[in-house]
Image (cartoon, rainbow, N blue to C red):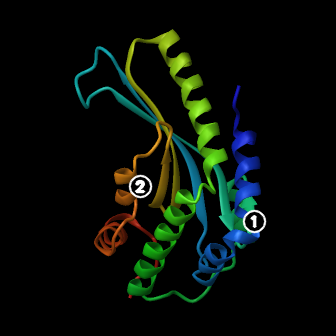
């Protein structure tokens, strides 16, 4: 059975690699933290199309200043605020971090994490199907900065087209920052 600690161990192993130095430097320079979240989607067989979809999110790690924190309280005690950056700089940073994560994904840096997610997704489907008849059970790993998704790994495997769609553009981040983010603005 896959548990939270299995994911945490892989995150620590992956994000502390020297190969990810450029990504870590981008995160440190902007004083960003990346939350890694397991997101469950469940739709029951007898529910109408979009009604009856249950979503559940579990925080399993926060990456900040080359360290992995398991809880928000651990992270908050280590967070060091800096002067706010301009909004356009934040948007540029988020685009670049997103593209860098996609680049690492294509190079298979997250393959162990993705394999663990596939196994975990299968287990979740079995659990839900014992309780209900489901139309859909999916689990993703979301990478978020201040609530804004910058990258995700799906529990069903991504096609090249889906990987390209993950390369969020400037418009996406601009809209997200205006809509519901506490990232700094001009």
Q: Which residue is mark 2?
A: 163
Query: Could you say where residue 146 lies in the image, as x and y percent from the top left?
Result: 50, 65
Q: Secondary structure at mark 1?
A: loop
Residue at coordinates 25% horizontally, 31% vertically from top-left? 50
Please indicate, yes or no, whether residue 145 appears anywhere in the rendered image: no
SS for callout 2: helix
Query: Circle 1 is placed at which residue position?
Result: 17
Q: Position of residue 21 (x, y in %)?
A: 69, 75
Q: How many marks?
A: 2
The residue sitting at the left extreme is: 48
- Residue 125, placed above or below residue 35: above
| Residue 149 visible, this orientation | yes
Nearest the camera: 56 or 168? 168
Residue under the point 48% across and 58% down: 151
Count residues near mark 2 (Cα–Cα under 10 Å), then give few for <14, some for 14-19, many for 20+: some
- Check contact, mark 2 vs mark 1: CB within 8 A: no
N-term-proximal mark, 2 vs 1: 1
Q: Position of residue 125 (x, y in %)?
A: 51, 22
Q: Is residue 89 above or below residue 48?
A: below
**Quadrant that contains the N terminus:** top right
Q: Is residue 21 left or right of residue 158?
A: right
Q: Is residue 20 left or right of residue 40?
A: right
Q: Hey, which quadrant is residue 13 in on the image?
A: bottom right
Q: Residue at x 44, y 45 (%)?
A: 158
Residue 121 coordinates in the image, percent (x, y) = 55, 30
Q: Quadrant of residue 104?
A: bottom right
Mark 1 Cα-neighbour bin, 10 Å: few <14, some 14–19, many ≥20: few
For image coordinates 75% across by 71% down, the residue present is 18
């Amino acid at each position: 059975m896959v548990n939270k600690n299995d994911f945490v161990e892989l995150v620590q192993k992956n994000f502390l690699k020297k190969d990810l130095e450029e990504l870590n430097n981008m995160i440190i320079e902007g004083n960003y933290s990346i939350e890694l979240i397991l997101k469950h989607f469940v739709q029951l067989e007898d529910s109408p199309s979009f009604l009856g979809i249950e979503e559940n999110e579990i925080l399993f790690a926060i990456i900040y200043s080359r360290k992995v924190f398991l809880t928000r309280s651990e992270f908050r005690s280590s967070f060091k605020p800096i002067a706010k950056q301009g909004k356009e700089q934040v948007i540029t940073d988020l685009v670049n971090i997103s593209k860098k994560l996609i680049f690492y994904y294509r190079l298979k840096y997250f393959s162990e994490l993705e394999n663990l997610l596939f196994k975990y997704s299968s287990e979740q489907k079995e659990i839900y199907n014992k309780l209900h008849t489901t139309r859909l059970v999916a689990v993703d790993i979301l990478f978020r900065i201040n609530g804004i998704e910058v990258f995700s790994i799906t529990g069903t495997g991504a096609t090249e087209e889906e990987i390209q769609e993950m390369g969020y553009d400037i418009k996406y981040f601009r809209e997200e920052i205006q809509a519901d983010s506490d990232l700094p603005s001009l």
